Amino acid sequence: MVLLSAYNAPFLFALAFIISLGVLEILSLLIGASAFSHLDSSLGSHFDLASGDNLLIQALSWLHIGKLPLLVMLVLLLGSFAIIGISGQYLMISLLQKPLPAGLMALIAFVLSLPTVHFIGRWLAPYLPKDESFAVSEDSFVGSMALVTQSAEQPGMSAECKIVDTYGQSHYLLIEPESPDIIFTRGERVLIIAKITSARFLASKNPWPNLL
């Protein structure tokens, strides 16, 4: 396979765009501002991705848009698209002795990149706060109420929740139930009762459902 071939054009463009984003961010940081920080704050102020019932909002939430910095999301999406596409063409040439049309492989790579972004983003989200303007200790989350944003698959398994700190910043954490027979569902409020790691906490059902 020749990497710089027409059948790899969409994926090479994606890689070139990633490099351009990196150069733009570095240049903007040199002058004292992030090129994407304003877009991050604007996105957070216009969409409540944790509690929206709109299908589009749920799709954006599934991709962790608004939970991760915009630059990270773009790099994840474009990088996954490029790697899957180039690898797919290599596989086609190995099996069929010819690549797929660039448009068809681009469509396949885009579809496969979405779940890739979802799973990598879910792993990264607790470690990459959307806004780092104020430092907040994870210990301060204990005793706070949180909103479940992604349900657990079955009782006893971890779920994802959103907690808002005293500065109004949103943090996304993984929570485990205090009892193995408890299952957390999207949209319910829970009480953070203990810290397990910097990004994983123990939680219980809301003890005051009529008040909070």
Image: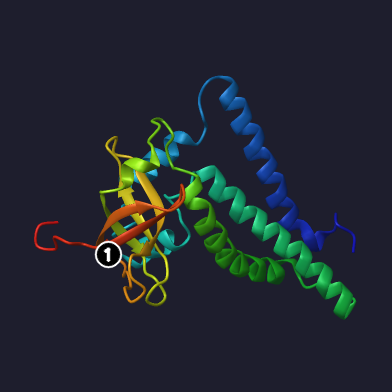
Residue 195 in the image: x percent, y percent? 39, 51
Residue at image position (66%, 45%) is 18
Percent x, y of residue 185: 31, 70
In the figure, is residue 161 to the left or right of 72? left
Q: Residue furthest bottom?
A: 96
Q: Please give the name of the residue rendered at 33% of the width and 77% of the height, measured from the top-left corner.
A: 181
The amino acid type found where label 1 is placed reads: Gly
Tell me the colour scheme of the image.
rainbow
Whole-percent x, y for residue 146 in the image: 28, 54
Foreground of the two, 116 or 163? 163
**Count of labels shown?**
1
Mark 1 lies on a secondary structure that is loop
* Residue that badge 1 annotates: 187
Q: Is residue 195 above or below residue 25?
A: below
Residue at 52%, 62% in the rendered image: 118
Q: Name the side, left or right, on which 39 lies relative to 113.
A: left
Q: Position of residue 104 (x, y in %)?
A: 69, 72
